[in-house]
Structures are given as structure tokens and as C-alpha cells.
Amino acid sequence: VIVDEMELLGRLKDTEPLPPEVSERAKMTLRAAMALEGAPGFPHPGASYQLQPAGDLEPAARRRLRSRRVLAGAAVAAVLLGGAAYIASRATSTSSTPRSGTIAYLTARAVTAAADASADVINARTTTSSGSAFDDWFGPGSGPIRSAQYWSYGPSGQLESDTSYATSSVTSVDYLDHTWWTVSGAAPRPLPPAAAAQAALFAGSPAELRALLQSAGANLAPDVTVDGQRAVTLTTTLPAGATLTFSFSEQSYQLLEVRLAGNPRPDADYETSYTYLAPTTASLANLKITIPHGFTKVSPPALPALNGGIRVSG
Amino acid sequence: VDDEAETRRAVASDAELIGRSLSGDLESFVEVVSRHEAAVWAYLVRRAGRGLAEDLLGEVWALAFESRGAYDRSFPDARPWLFGVARNALRRHWRSRRADHVIADLADAPAGLDPWPAVDERIDGMRALRRALAQLRPEEREVLFLVVWEELSIADAARTLRIPAGTARYYLHRARLTLRGAPGMVALLTESDTEKEKK
């Protein structure tokens, strides 16, 4: 009998075509990794805008109010961004991590779930230990860059400002001063970098999540209840001693909550809860900003560079 | 932008595209991925099944992108390297599974245990061949599949596994000998031969 066993084995080879949607989703993960490499650091939208207040004509009271809000936002952003950068660097430098538990499995599932959620409208509701709260809405889109709307509430609960980051413009309403402003630019990218980075950071881009979850020394805790849902939590310690905890749905592996606790700055702790909504008329309406009747249009504050050639229309 | 994409497509060598991506033209790496995504997808599906392959494909691209600095650009074709990255992604996945579900590592597989469920399912109708494959050492089987299923040369299979080409050749030789001598294989091959004669 002269038969080639390799030919026999070759008959077992079957080829399944790569589905276009799988190809696209995988490339989205790649592009998120690229975005991470290309964006070493970025400001929180709220912080970056409020840190550059409008001109000298602003009333002192307005500046004080803003500065309190800015400090809280900036502190949160600084700790968060520093932590993310640190974790990302650790994850990059330890390519074989992690070995223990099911962290790698959780990472793979969570990254896939994040990619799957790219067509959703995502609401990220953040409360800080300083008393401020943020209600962020991320619109559906391809890749980590999404339209976003940023709201902030004061410690007493009233709406302070409402800012929309659209494709090539930023519009903000100041509920304390009853004013609003807008800037627009012929942006080569869909969104200003800050808003895009914000979306990538908070809405769970696959690469960002992967870098965060694969950080060395992370601890996994299954069977936790978060907002009434069964969850898996993963906790990692940041350089300053604060702990960053991610909670994922046990069922869908979607990110449910991110919590920063134990920060040396007591007003810098925060907790963000995520909700995923199908892109319906009702959910998409949350992305639209409303300028209340009677509010006065003013010149925008001095902004950090948005895409270089920004055009300001006050 | 279209001109740039056209230029990337016209670049013959994967190595050159990877070099360009290291110089800041990140889209060049997407072109490398586009060239090999069908092959890497097939590699994953054959070893892990479609569901897990869907989960891991993006992971493979991200891992490859992050490690592209270590790519040896004296090799113009990146496919064996990408298979190696995919293999590492699979190993990491299997390591991360619970101990009572899967083995910790392919190298630690006890004799007769096949951690590749997709392979099992596909060859259920050919138990003799399955048993014969189970007798192979993991590296022997991997070389065999890389050559037969992924259609790599022995040298490229060696690149994928990061072993000397001579070693890969030896593994392939051993694998073929083992298959030929395994119980039930003679009948299977005879039947196969008869089928061929019918045609």
C-alpha cells in the first residue's frame, strides 16, 4: 500500500471564509492598538476646556466656581490618565503577562464585548468624591472615535454646563452664566483629539481595555454583584497606591463599572457606571445638545489646539 | 489618501511595510494584515474553532502590531511570523482557561489528550487518524499541520515555531513515520487508496 499520509491529512483541511464583519472587528482592535500607540496622553475634555477660562472680563465669582470644578475634573483626569499610561507601559513591557487566573480570558472576552458595543450608544455616569458628577454619552461609530456629549453637574446637583463634541465642532452651554459658545474647524479627523481620546479612554476601546486588564499584579474576583448584575471584577494598584477596579458583566463581559479609590488626593476618587443602549431615536437624542431660549452667545474660551487649524466663530 | 493606499498595496514586501509602520506610517501595517488575514483566520479556525477564532483574531493583530519592532526584516514574507503570533495568542488563551477544563500548556499535554476541540470534531469520522495524531508530540503535530494545512515550507514552519529548519524537518519526518505505523492507519490508507482508484 503506497498512500501518502500527508495527503490523507490534507483532506481534513477545511477552509472557512473570513466573514467581513469578523475582519472589520478584528481590524478595529488593531486600529485601537494603533491609536493607543499614537496617543501618549490626552486631557479630559472637561478639564482641558475649563482650565483655559475665558478672558479677563469674566466675573470673579464665575472663575471661582469654575476653578473648583476644574480642580476636581483635572485631578480625576490626571490620576486616571497617569494610571492608564502606567498600566499601558507595564502591559507593553511584559508581553507574557498575565499567567495566573483567568485574566487573559477575561481580557479577550471584554475586548470582544467592547468591540461589539461599538454600534451602541454608551452612557458613562461618573460621580467623584469632590461632589461633581459627569454624564457622558458616546454615540455609535467605527473605531474608538465617537461623537460624545459631556455634561457636568455641580455639587448641589444643578446642571452647570453641557458640551457637545460633534464631528467638526464643539458647542458648550454654561448654565451658571446663561451663555453658550461654539467653535468649528475643518478637522481632518472626525473629532477633536480630546474628545476622541475621551471616548477611547472611557468607553472602553479594545486596546485600552486590553492594556488595562493585562497589567501586572491585577487581581481577579468572580461572583460579585454590581448594580444588580453578576460581575467579575479586576483590581489593579496604581503607583500612588490608589486602586482601580473594573467590573464586567458575567454574562456579556461588557464593562459595567470603573472605580478609583484610595487616591492620596481625597477629592480625586471616582466611580463610573456604564450603560449600553441600542441606537434608537430616544438614545441618540442624548447626543444632541440643546441651547435654552434666552441664553447669550459668547466668544469661546481660549482652547487648547484642536486639530491644529481650528476656526473659531464666537 | 487613495494614492497612499495604492502605494502601500504596490509595495511587494511585508518586511518593507512593517518597516514603514515603524517609521510612523501605521496604515502600512493594516496592509500587511489585509494580505494575510484570511490565512491567519483559517489557522485559528482549524485549531480553535470559529467562535474562539472570532475572539482572537483582533488580539492577534494587536499583538503583532505591538511586537512588530522585533520582526526580522530579512524575511520578506510575514505570514510565518503571523502564524507564530497567532500560536502564542492561542497558547495564552489555553493557559488562561481553568485547570479542570484544559491543560496548562500544549507542551504539558499528557499522551492522548488533544486540546484542540475543532480538530477533534473535524476528524471524528476518522478515529484511527485521530488516535495516530494523538501519538504525535505537540511540536511534531504543529509542524505537520503547518506544512499540510497552512501550506508552509519546512523553513517557514520552522520560523513560525522559532526552531531550526533541521529540527522542523526531523519533526515532520517523525510525524509521518508515526502516522504510517499507527494502528488502523494501514486500513485507512488502503481505503483511501481504493477511493482514489475509484476516481
Image: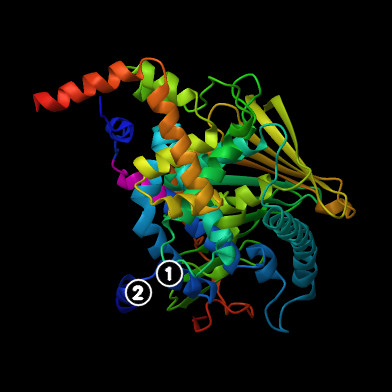
Tell me the subunit letter for badge 1.
B
Q: Are marks 2 and 1 in contact (CB under 8 Å)?
A: yes
| Residue at the spot 32% in from the left edge and 70% down from the top edge | B9
Q: Tell me: residue A313, above or below residue A90.
A: below
Region rendered in magenta = A17-25
Q: Which residue is mark 2?
A: B11
Q: Which residue is mark 1?
A: B28
Q: Amino acid at mark 2?
A: Val
Asked if badge 2 and badge 1 are on a common chain, one would say yes
Query: Which of the two residues, B150 or A84, is positioned nearer the viewer here?
Result: B150
Tell me where residue A169 appears, x and y as whole percent: 47, 71
Q: Main secondary structure of the magenta part?
A: helix
The answer to which quarter of the image holds residue A151 is bottom right
Sequence-wise first label, 2 or 1 = 2
Dot 2: element:
loop
Tell me the subunit letter for badge 2.
B
The answer to which quarter of the image holds residue A77 is bottom right
